[in-house]
Each structure stands twice: as structure tokens, then as C-alpha cells.
Image: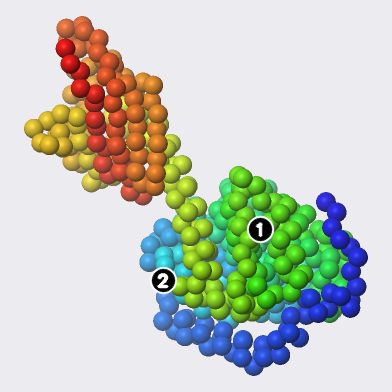
Amino acid sequence: MTLNTNYTFEAMEPQYNLRALRPDYEVTVTPDWTRRSEAFRATAKGKLDLPYGEGSRERIDFFPAADADAPLLIYFHGGYWQRGDKSMYSFLAEPYVKNGVAVALVNYDLCPSVRISKITPQTRKAVAWLYTNAGELGFSSERIFVMGHSAGGHITGMLLGTDWPAFQRGLPADLIKGGFPLSPLNDLEPVRFSSINDGVKMDAAEAKSESPMYHPPLTNAPQLVVCGARETDEFHRQADMYVETFSTVERPIERYSVPDSDHFDELNVLANENSVFFQKTLELIKRTLLAAQEKTNIATLKNIVKAFNTHNIPAVTAFFAEDGEMLSASGKEPCGTRLSGKAAIADALAKRFTSTPDIQWIDGTEWVSGNNGLSQWTVTWTDGDGIRTSIMGCDIYKFRDGLVVRKDTFYKQRVS
């Protein structure tokens, strides 16, 4: 990949020295964020300063959602790798927690005490620690999303390009299910030609090795890449080139500009749960989780058919919730015969498999939409008189948390 290298200080300084464009940053912006964050922490049931390493800044603030199996959003703050603290951004967690998403805000070491090349593996360590401690903290390790702003957007890109099994044994390749690079720095070379590099001290080699543009995403996790509409041209270019280079049909990466917002105002919009920006992030999380659940439910339907065809009753009932029920195709009730609970289901199956020991469900096809499923098949068996019968039919399923809560069977009506 070849990127533009014809940069000058005169051209890049006004593009990247964003505080010069907001002289009120220290007077109004950060005091407001600090006040709102303190107010949220005062009422939230958060766990603060959790250590993910031995360093003094290797700390995480965790804010749980109501559900212990909730998705997790990991947030990395900006500050050009030189300043900032997780405590200033607690206010961003509030709308997500309210909408069922747990949030972890991560601190990391800052330049010039460390180089950027040390920050990337440190943030990977934070993500790995959260994955490992999901059960204790109270969120699902299978539902992790990453978000970062500015320098944190750079970190987000690097995390999406991480080979997790190679980084730490036992981590899944698809550890991160979705990403939100906000005003990300994907090509670090132009940053070297600004006063930002006075503290970061990148050379050309480090700028290239730490640029997400040279670390493509390693999974098809969906992303939403965002900039404020009033950001500088360079920040729009940084976002656009990432989307144009790495978005595919299999890996959808949406590009969004927050109306009437600059680099800092966009976070205020994000904190508003009624904003289009926030709703886009929440929808990506929900849509991704739904797709994963549908994939799981399809696999469950296929495995249920296998269990039926091997007459493995414990395997069949293992797919059912404790309060699951099975409605047969015939019976005295309008719904057929209602079998409620695993014991009743197991008893009915034992009788069926005994009376028709060669019964099989063949030529099956499965469909899933959310927590609803359909399995179509042809059931064949030999009755006590030796007569072979084949009838087409289907099962309509209802799932909850990956388990069957209802299986409703329908047959074609055979006419002699």
C-alpha cells in the first residue's frame, strides 16, 4: 500500500492541532465532561480502577448493565496518546448502560514516557483481561465491541487488526464483534508533520508500523467509522480511506459524519441516546448480536434433527429450556398434544422411538429469523403392520437465549 508522503508542517499543523481551533477546550469542554462523568459515577454501580496490569495507568473503570450476559463496549479515550484519562469519559457510558450495554473505559500509558509502539500491545492486554474476566465482572465474553475517539480511534483500528490467538493463547480470532473508530488516525505519517509529534516523537518507521492502514481488519466484524461534519479535511480523509480500503460485502464498514459537530462536539452528540449517532452505534450492536444468534439457532436446528434421527433423547432435551414445550401434530387440544417440560418431552419421545424404531426426518431445510425458526422435512417410518409411510411436515420453533421454548409440529394430511 502506498500512501501520500508529501506533507509539510505548514499544511498539517492546522489540520491536526485541534485545540488551537477550540480555545474554549480547557474552559468549557473538559470541565463539562468531568462534571457529567462525576455525576454518573455517583449513581452508577461501577467498579473503578480495576487493574489489568502492574503499571499505574493500567486501570479500567467498568459499568455493568442490568443483564449479566450483556454485551460489552470497551472505550479508549483520545488525547493524541499524550493526555486524557478514563474518568473524564464516564458520561459516555450512561446511555449505553441504560440501553443494556456494559461499558469499560480503559487507561493506558502516555507519551512521552512510552512510545506509541508500547501503547498498542498494552491496550491489547486490557482487552484480553476483560475477555478473561467477563464472568466475574458480569458481561458476555462473546459480545465484545470496541470504540475509541481520536487516538483512541487509532487504537480501535489496531485492535481490529490484531491476531488474538497469536497474542494470547486461548483467545478467539473473532474476539471483537464490532468496532467504532471515531475520528480515527489511520495513517500516522502526516501527524509527524505537526506539533503533535513533539511529545510523541514518531519516526517514519514507527508511524508506518503503528498505522491501522497497514494492519487490515482480520475478521469481518462490522464497523461504524465516524467524524464530526465540521472536522478538518485531514480527519475526513483519514476516515474515508479506511472505509474505502477495507469495507467489503462480507465486512460492512459504514461511514457517518455527525451533523454540525467538530472533533469534540461529536462526543456530546454520542452521549445523547436520542441522537442518530448514538442510535447507529446501538443498532450495530443489536444487529450484530441478532445475526450471531440466528447463526447459533440455525446450528441448533440442524443438531436437533441429528439428535432426533439418532433417537438420542438426552441430546434432544438438552436443546430445550427448562420450561420448554413441544406441541404434537395431533391430539385432543386445538394445539395438538402439549408436552410441557423436559421430562414430559423425554417420555413422549421414548414411546415414539419404541413404537417406530426406524423413524427418520430427512431432506431437511432450516430457516431462522431472530428467535423464530422453521425446520421443514419429510418424516418416514414403518408401522406395526410393516407399512412404510412418508409425510412432509415442519416444526415451528421459538428460541430464548439459544434454547428452545416451543416446538410446534405440523404434518401434511394424507388422504386414502
Viewer-closest of 330 and 205: 330
Viewer-closest of 377 and 100: 377
Write the residue at 24% across / 36% down.
408
Rendering quarter of residue 153: bottom right
The circle drawn on residue 46 is none
Write the residue at 15% across / 29% down.
330
Residue tagged 2? 98
Colour scheme of the picture: rainbow
Viewer-closest of 415 and 384: 415
| Separation (CA) of disc 2 from disc 1 | 26 Å
- The kind of residue tagged 2 is Lys
Q: Secondary structure at mark 1?
A: helix
Q: Nearer the viewer's eye, disc 2 or disc 1? A: 2
Residue tagged 1? 159
- Residue 369 rendering spot, x and y as whole percentages: 39, 44
- The kind of residue tagged 1 is Leu
User: In this orientation, does residue 123 appear?
Assistant: no
In this rendering, position of residue 279 left or right of residue 408:
right
In this rendering, position of residue 328 left or right of residue 152:
left
- Residue 388 rendering spot, x and y as whole percentages: 25, 9
Query: Mark 1 or mark 2, which is nearer the start of the sequence?
Result: 2
Write the residue at 61% across / 86% down.
30
Write the residue at 18% across / 24% down.
351
| Residue 77 vertical placement versus 311 (above, below) | below
Q: Secondary structure at mark 2?
A: helix
**Neighbour tally class for label 2: few under 14, some 14-19, many 20 plus, Cα within 10 Å:** few
